[in-house]
Image (cartoon, rainbow, N blue to C red):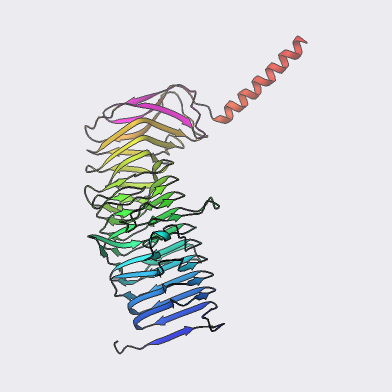
């Protein structure tokens, strides 16, 4: 321990000799050494809050042992604090024979500046046997923020003022940095929400549960993994819907959806949205009962991919979708295996020469002839297996000869013609005259006559109804 000033504040309210505790607050400022919270011994607390600023912990163990219960929420906030151990568990259970730790509320973790030398397991880790595979020790959500904090006053994430870094724990040759739902047998009845604002992540990130279930059948809004990356550097692969190598040799289940949103960051390895096996180890994939959804938004100049990086769709029972939403700039990664890729209104995406898109359907959304999604191919590859779908806003209008350009081709790339569908937002086909145009410079829709707005159809039908009634009255 060095000589720097140490302030040690712990508030314990002991309500009985059997270690039954009320809400517990741990505050550490400018402290070195190990941190220990609740440990084995039939301990319970109404809630638990841990705040550490400018600390260096040799080990960090908020909950470690057996027969421990937190009736409310567990909140951990670390500011400019480092942990030197190879692996940090937020909730670590030891009992082989019974549920050994439970959080009956939500678990939240924030790392706002500082360094974790090894890996981080945020949810529950159990060293129990196979009989604990279905253990759901966290009744609420698991929520984490890395490289900053959430400012509730203005509902924004703020990047940390000092660097944030998470190292990697080597497990069977796999460098693991963040396991969102914990380790072995980790499960939760709510959602798993991870936002990375900034920082350097050395190893892989995995969001799915290991041999357990995320979500509750009684709560339709639960069971989602939500990974939001706003910035940072990522040296390992990212798994938004899977868990890494499992010592239980069993698959987990995500009852909801696997969701990934990218608005910043530098990515050196592949990204997997749904449930997949790994390109460098045998993964025990999760079963995703909902959908796998990827989204890129904002200025693509803030998102950098190494050459050859691929965003894979993976597997999900209810389909795999990738969205470009309010996105502009050059896309450096390839997209593979998605059922549909959507170029939404106000998105203008240039596909880099090293990148490719392979999808079942390519959808474009258009509010008008000047406000619509646009894809530019620059020595890049586009493979559409089924159809090009164009979704027009209800207010969309066009005149004879107007051209709606959806793909701009800046080289000799040849598009393979597929079915083209022109639809309302409600899914019904447009009745007006139009033709699809595939040429060496572009793909788009040429309108061969005026397209009335849906309100015009309604007026016309109304007038027709009045006319029919009038005719019937005259005949009578």
- Tell me the quarter of the picture where residue 165 sits: bottom left
Whether residue 103 is visible, yes or no, is yes
Is 66 in the magenta? no
- Location of the N terminus by quadrant is bottom left
Please name the residue shown 46% across and 70% down the image: 75
- Tell me the quarter of the picture where residue 232 sits: bottom left
Q: Residue furthest top?
A: 475
Query: Where does the image place residue 72, in percent across and percent down from the top left?
Result: 53, 69
In front here: 158 or 62?
62
Please name the residue shown 34% across and 50% down the image: 285
- Tell me the quarter of the picture where residue 13 sits: bottom right
Query: Where does the image place residue 94, in percent across and percent down from the top left?
Result: 39, 70
- Location of the C terminus by quadrant is top right
Is the residue 239 above or below the residue 178 in the image? Answer: above
- Give the left or right position of residue 48, taking residue 442 as reference: right
Q: Residue furthest right?
A: 476
Query: Where does the image place residue 193, in percent across and percent down from the top left?
Result: 43, 58
In front here: 441 or 189?
189
In front here: 117 or 93?
93
Query: Where does the image place residue 339, in percent across and percent down from the top left?
Result: 37, 38
In front here: 365 or 132?
132
Whether residue 91 is visible, yes or no, is no
Task: Provide the residue span drawn in magenta.
Answer: 418-445
Instruction: Please tell me how many numbered marks the rendered image carries.
Output: 0
Is the residue 473 above or below the residue 242 in the image? Answer: above
Please name the residue shown 41% across and 50% down the image: 258
């Amino acid at each position: 321990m060095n000589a720097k000033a140490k302030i040690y504040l712990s508030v314990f309210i002991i309500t009985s000799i059997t270690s039954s505790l009320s809400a517990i607050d741990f505050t550490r400022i400018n402290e070195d050494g190990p941190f220990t919270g609740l440990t084995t011994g039939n301990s319970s607390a109404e809630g638990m809050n841990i705040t550490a600023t400018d600390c260096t912990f040799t080990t960090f163990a908020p909950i470690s042992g057996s027969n421990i219960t937190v009736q409310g929420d567990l909140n951990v906030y670390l500011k400019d604090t480092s942990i030197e151990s190879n692996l940090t568990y937020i909730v670590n259970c030891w009992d082989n024979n019974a549920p050994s730790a439970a959080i009956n509320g939500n678990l939240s973790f924030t790392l706002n500046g500082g360094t974790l030398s090894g890996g981080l397991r945020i949810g529950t880790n159990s060293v129990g046997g196979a009989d604990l595979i279905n253990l759901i020790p966290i009744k609420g959500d698991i929520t984490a923020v890395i490289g900053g904090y959430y400012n509730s006053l203005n509902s924004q994430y703020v990047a940390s003022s000092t660097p944030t870094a998470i190292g990697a724990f080597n497990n069977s040759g796999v460098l693991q940095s963040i396991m969102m739902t914990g380790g072995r047998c980790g499960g939760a009845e709510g959602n798993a929400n991870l936002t990375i604002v900034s920082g350097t992540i050395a190893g892989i990130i995995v969001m799915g549960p290991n041999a357990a279930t995320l979500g509750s059948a009684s709560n339709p809004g639960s069971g989602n993994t939500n990974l939001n990356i706003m910035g940072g550097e990522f040296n390992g692969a990212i798994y938004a819907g899977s868990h890494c190598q499992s010592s239980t040799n069993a698959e987990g289940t995500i009852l909801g959806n696997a969701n990934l949103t990218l608005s910043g960051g530098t990515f050196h390895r592949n990204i997997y949205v749904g449930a997949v096996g790994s390109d460098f180890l045998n993964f025990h994939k999760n079963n995703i009962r909902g959908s796998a959804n990827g989204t890129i938004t904002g200025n693509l100049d803030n998102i950098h991919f190494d050459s050859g990086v691929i965003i894979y769709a993976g597997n999900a029972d209810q389909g795999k979708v990738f969205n470009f939403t309010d996105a502009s700039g050059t896309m450096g990664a390839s997209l593979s295996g998605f059922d549909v890729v959507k170029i939404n209104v106000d998105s203008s995406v240039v596909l880099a020469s090293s990148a490719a898109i392979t999808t079942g359907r390519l959808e474009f959304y258009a509010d008008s002839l000047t406000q619509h999604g646009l894809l530019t191919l620059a020595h890049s590859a586009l493979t559409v297996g089924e159809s090009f779908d164009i979704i027009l806003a209800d207010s969309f209008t066009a005149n004879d000869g107007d051209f709606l350009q959806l793909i701009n081709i800046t080289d000799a790339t040849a598009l393979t013609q597929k079915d083209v569908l022109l639809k309302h937002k409600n899914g019904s086909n447009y009745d007006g005259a139009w033709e699809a145009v595939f040429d060496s410079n572009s793909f788009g829709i040429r309108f061969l006559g005026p397209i009335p707005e849906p309100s015009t159809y309604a007026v016309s039908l109304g007038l027709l109804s009045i006319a029919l009634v009038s005719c019937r009255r005259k005949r009578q």
